[in-house]
Image (cartoon, grey):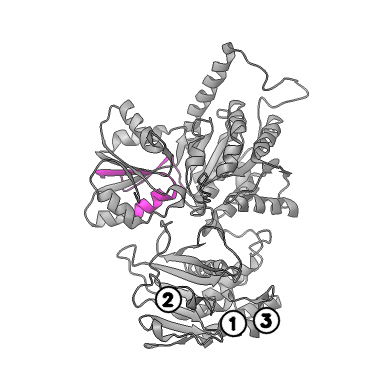
């Protein structure tokens, strides 16, 4: 009889989810703060608890190449990375999505050097925003586990067939221990059908993958990638509903906290959104009408976000970014502003750049920044 | 016995604990044991250490947050309600009361050091010789006395967790210490009488926790 609740780190939670998904192949290279994920998986494989082929590669580029090779043969595959490791696999990251391979990857968000820094920063994932991967950003140990469980189902859905990335912030989530409610293995087996990749290489029906394609066809491949990414938005919502039926836990592309009557809407991702909820509660007690809208999903950019923004009456938007596009702006802030234009909505927008390279962002500091009525861009600590 | 938490605001129904230890002494595990104990009492809890690389022997800190509601704070703990000093030599090199709230609780492993406790008179001070307790039960890893188990037992004297929860948490955490070992191995052992069925190391750990609890003395105020 399996225990229902354990007390583990975000990293171990991801490894436990992967164990349930039983990938045929795991190919990964350790890097702080992701290391625990691949270590725990390696032990599961060594002890025979998990019957995956574990490929010990010499680099992240090879890790993703091995994932691509295995998925091209129809295998369920998993890898995990972070920061420089992620960037080292960059070429293969794009290959995986254009080849429409449902690889699941956990990325433990960490800053980029130099000025060696091992702490939380979303730049590693945000710099791959346009790589054609589905991107989730999680905010608790439970959510990292649940999202990894859902990621396999979403990636492998016949309407999607796209690689999927589950992000958890380095240390603040990867190394924090929280109670974790486990999903029953038999129930999860029913939730996740066997993987079937329609274009997998097959000796019975020989074909090739990845040959030269002409200008007459390349744009169609890209068009197709986007079509499936758009379709993924509805599939994700469907999978989240089914996951709720199995686990009792509800997720959506946007998670709202005290938003309905809010005059000020804070928009953020990951753990900073949770910290913002604490600031929000304190400001509510002081009579401020403020709410927090957390984006769990950056790609596909969720329709649900647009629907909520149309419906909600807040006139002031505060957007928190843990990643920055130099010479342009906070990445999430700029995406939200572009979508407001599409909707024909003019809002007062304030962009807060906070938490870069693991900068500690206490709720008291967020509260002060939320109360500062000036608009424009503010860098916390500058 | 259990710390009463008011429902009025987040700050009040939450307890933040900082543990001072040296790398390799099991400070992170102590933070986890406290969090698991609180969790067994139906509370929310998280445990973490100083985010970053650690070195064996160097001063380090780990943390536990306990709350009546979901914990949404991921920022560092700067103003703890309670400080636990596992290593008897650390108070002379680290400002262990930094940020500790006035009247906050301070639990110190005094070891055989003549730690000057008078300077902590603004706090509610508890003292125990956890090193001696650990050595008495021969709790050693790589020749170093294990301090987390007795200190978690002693922490039960602070009223944050009960001794029963502390002992159950010690069983759970030590039983599941290896990620491969099924966490369920000792999980069924909730009745703490009849621990004869436990492996002798487990039994020794529980006895150490209980002895440290009994030997913990409050140095000022009542109780």
Q: Which mark is residue B131?
A: 1
- State which tag comes first along the sequence, 3 or 1: 1
Question: What whole-number distance in Å separates the C-alpha atoms at marks 1 and 2?
Answer: 26 Å
Residue visible at 23% across and 46% down? A373
Question: What whole-number distance in Å separates the C-alpha atoms at marks 3 and 2?
Answer: 31 Å
Residue A219 seen: yes
Chain on which label 3 sits: B
Residue A198: image location, x then y, percent: 66, 26
As drawn, A206 above or below A105? above
Within the magenta stretch, is there residue A277? yes
Query: Which residue is identified by label 2?
Result: B2
Nearest to the eye among marks 3 and 1: give it: 1
What crowding class fits label 1: few (fewer than 14 Cα within 10 Å), some (14-19), or many (20 or more)? many
Chain on which label 1 sits: B
**Circles 1 and 2: CB distance less than 8 Å?**
no
| Along the viewing direction, whichever of A267 and A248 lies nearer the viewer | A267
Q: Which mark is residue B138?
A: 3
Chain on which label 2 sits: B
Question: What whole-number distance in Å separates the C-alpha atoms at marks 3 and 1?
Answer: 10 Å
Residue B61: image location, x then y, percent: 50, 67
Q: Is residue A308 left or right of residue A33?
A: left
What crowding class fits label 2: few (fewer than 14 Cα within 10 Å), some (14-19), or many (20 or more)? few
| Along the viewing direction, whichever of A297 and B148 lies nearer the viewer | B148
Q: Which residues are magenta?
A: A250-278
Within the magenta stretch, is there residue A214? no
What crowding class fits label 3: few (fewer than 14 Cα within 10 Å), some (14-19), or many (20 or more)? some
């Amino acid at each position: 009889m399996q225990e229902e609740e354990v007390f583990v780190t975000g990293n171990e939670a991801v490894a436990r989810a992967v164990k349930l998904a039983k990938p045929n192949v795991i190919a990964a290279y350790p890097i702080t703060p992701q290391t625990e994920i691949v270590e725990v998986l390696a032990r599961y494989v060594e002890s025979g608890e998990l019957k995956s082929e574990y490929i010990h590669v010499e680099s992240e580029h090879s890790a993703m190449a091995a994932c691509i090779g295995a998925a091209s043969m129809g295998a369920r595959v998993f890898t995990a990375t972070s920061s420089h490791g992620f960037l080292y696999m960059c070429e293969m990251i794009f290959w995986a999505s254009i080849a429409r391979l449902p690889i699941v990857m956990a990325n433990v968000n960490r800053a980029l050097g130099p000025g060696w820094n091992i702490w939380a920063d979303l730049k590693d994932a945000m710099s791959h925003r346009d790589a054609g991967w589905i991107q989730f950003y999680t905010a608790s140990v439970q959510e990292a586990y649940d999202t990894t469980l859902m990621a396999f189902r979403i990636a492998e859905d016949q309407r999607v067939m796209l690689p999927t990335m589950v992000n958890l912030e380095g240390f603040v989530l990867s190394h924090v221990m929280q109670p974790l409610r486990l999903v029953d293995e038999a129930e999860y087996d029913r939730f996740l059908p066997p993987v079937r990749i329609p274009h997998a290489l097959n000796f019975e029906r020989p074909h090739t993958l990845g040959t030269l394609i002409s200008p007459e066809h390349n744009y169609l491949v890209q068009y197709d990638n986007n079509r499936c990414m758009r379709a993924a938005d509805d599939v994700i919502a469907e999978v989240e509903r089914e996951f709720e039926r199995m686990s009792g836990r509800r997720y959506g592309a946007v998670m709202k906290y005290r938003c309905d009557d809010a005059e000020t809407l804070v928009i953020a991702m990951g753990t900073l959104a949770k910290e913002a909820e604490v600031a929000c509660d304190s400001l509510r007690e002081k009579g401020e009408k403020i709410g927090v809208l957390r984006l769990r999903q950056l790609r596909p950019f969720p329709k649900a976000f647009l629907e909520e923004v149309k419906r909600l009456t807040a006139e002031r938007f505060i957007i928190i970014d843990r990643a920055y596009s130099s010479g342009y702006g906070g990445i999430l802030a700029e995406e939200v502003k572009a979508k407001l234009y599409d909707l024909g909505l003019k809002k007062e927008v304030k962009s807060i750049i906070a938490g870069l390279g693991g900068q500690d962002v206490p709720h008291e500091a967020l509260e002060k920044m939320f109360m500062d009525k000036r608009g424009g861009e503010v860098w916390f600590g500058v | 016995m259990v710390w009463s938490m008011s429902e009025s605001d987040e700050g009040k129904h939450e307890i933040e604990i900082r543990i001072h230890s040296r790398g390799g002494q099991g400070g992170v595990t102590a933070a986890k044991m406290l969090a698991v104990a609180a969790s067994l009492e139906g509370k929310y809890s998280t445990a973490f250490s100083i985010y970053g690389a650690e070195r064996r022997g160097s001063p380090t800190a780990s943390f536990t947050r306990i709350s009546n509601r979901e914990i949404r704070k991921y920022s560092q703990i700067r103003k703890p309600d309670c400080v636990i000093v596992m290593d008897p030599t650390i108070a002379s090199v680290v400002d262990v009361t930094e940020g500790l709230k006035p009247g906050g609780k301070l639990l110190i492993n005094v070891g055989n050091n003549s730690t000057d406790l008078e300077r902590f008179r603004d706090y509610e001070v508890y003292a125990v010789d956890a090193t001696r307790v650990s050595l008495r039960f021969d709790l050693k890893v790589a020749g170093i006395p294990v301090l987390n188990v007795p200190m978690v037992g002693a922490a039960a004297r602070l009223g944050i967790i009960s001794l029963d929860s502390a002992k159950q948490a010690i069983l759970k955490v030590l039983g599941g210490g290896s990620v491969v070992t099924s966490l369920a191995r000792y999980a069924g052992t909730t009745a703490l009488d009849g621990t004869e069925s436990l492996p002798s190391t487990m039994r020794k750990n529980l006895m150490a926790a209980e002895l440290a609890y009994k030997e913990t003395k409050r140095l000022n105020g009542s109780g």
